[in-house]
Image (cartoon, rainbow, N blue to C red):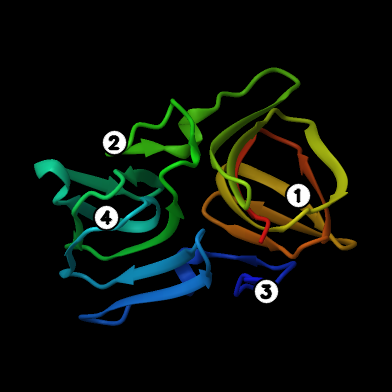
Amino acid sequence: MRCEMKEDAGKVFSIAKDNKALEGCTISKEVHGGENYISYFSMAKGTDISVELFPYYKFIILAEGELEVYGFVGSTRRLRESESIVIPFNAPVGMKTELGAVFTEIAVRKDDFMNRAVKAGEVFQLGNLVQYQDGKIVNMDVVHNDKMKFVVMAFDAGTGLSEHAAPGEAIIFVLDGKAIIGYEGTEHTIKAGENFYFAKAGKHYVKAEKKFKMGLLLTLE
């Protein structure tokens, strides 16, 4: 069965702005189903998701607010805006927030590839995983399997990707700077904190007039 992402192709959007919480509530929105599920979560101020066990890693990317992740091996980790964490496999975990939080959650299976630069249970910045190189584009696979991949990329000023078609659906997370995304004949300016969605086979290109970093979440189901 094919699982399609629930986003509009060819539009700049913001996960943080488009998924505001309701007072006293926690809201989840499934964006992609199946084994490699992707969901957005919105937690209002002072809310809590109680401790549970999950048979997979939970890869969390915080778009807005602050989030306290607790319960796994007696540890507590606090995430601030634009920080990430991979919660250990099959570990008890709960989440709470005093200020409110909006985040993306991605399921990562036990046997999936995970880059050694990422330590499960530790808070990190996706943008810090790759450094700019003069005149080059630097890529790093963060996690992947045969149906899903998350890559971070650093574009030096003046570099870019020529037009090509996406082999699957993809969401861009802009981590630093801004760039031009060309999609199906239309150019869009996209900057840090914003997102963009490509449909499968959507023709696109990237032009970085200045330094630019992004995360690319690709699904191949």
Residue type, numbered disc 3 = Asp
> Which residue matches tag 4?
66
Name the secondary structure under disc 1: strand
Name the secondary structure under disc 4: strand
Q: Earlier in the sequence, mark 4 or mark 3?
A: 3
Q: Which mark is residue 8?
A: 3
Which callout, 3 or 1, points to the residue nearer the camera?
Answer: 3
What residue lies at 16% left-to-right and 51% top-to-bottom? 70
Q: Earlier in the sequence, mark 4 or mark 1?
A: 4
Q: Are marks 3 and 2 in contact (CB under 8 Å)?
A: no
Q: Earlier in the sequence, mark 2 or mark 4?
A: 4
Viewer-nearest residue: 55 or 155 = 55
From the image, which quarter does the C terminus lie in?
A: bottom right
> Which residue matches tag 1?
180
Residue 75 visible in the picture:
no
What residue lies at 70% left-to-right and 46% top-to-bottom? 179
Whole-angstrom CA distance, mark 2 to mark 4, is 15 Å
Position of residue 1 relative to residue 161, above or below, is below
> Which residue matches tag 2?
122
Which callout, 3 or 2, points to the residue nearer the camera?
Answer: 2
Q: Earlier in the sequence, mark 2 or mark 1?
A: 2
Residue at the extreme left: 74
Residue type, numbered disc 4 = Glu
Residue type, numbered disc 2 = Glu
Callout 1 environment at 10 Å: few (<14), some (14 to 19), or many (20+)? some
> x and y percent of residue 157 in the render?
72, 30
Q: Which mark is residue 23?
A: none
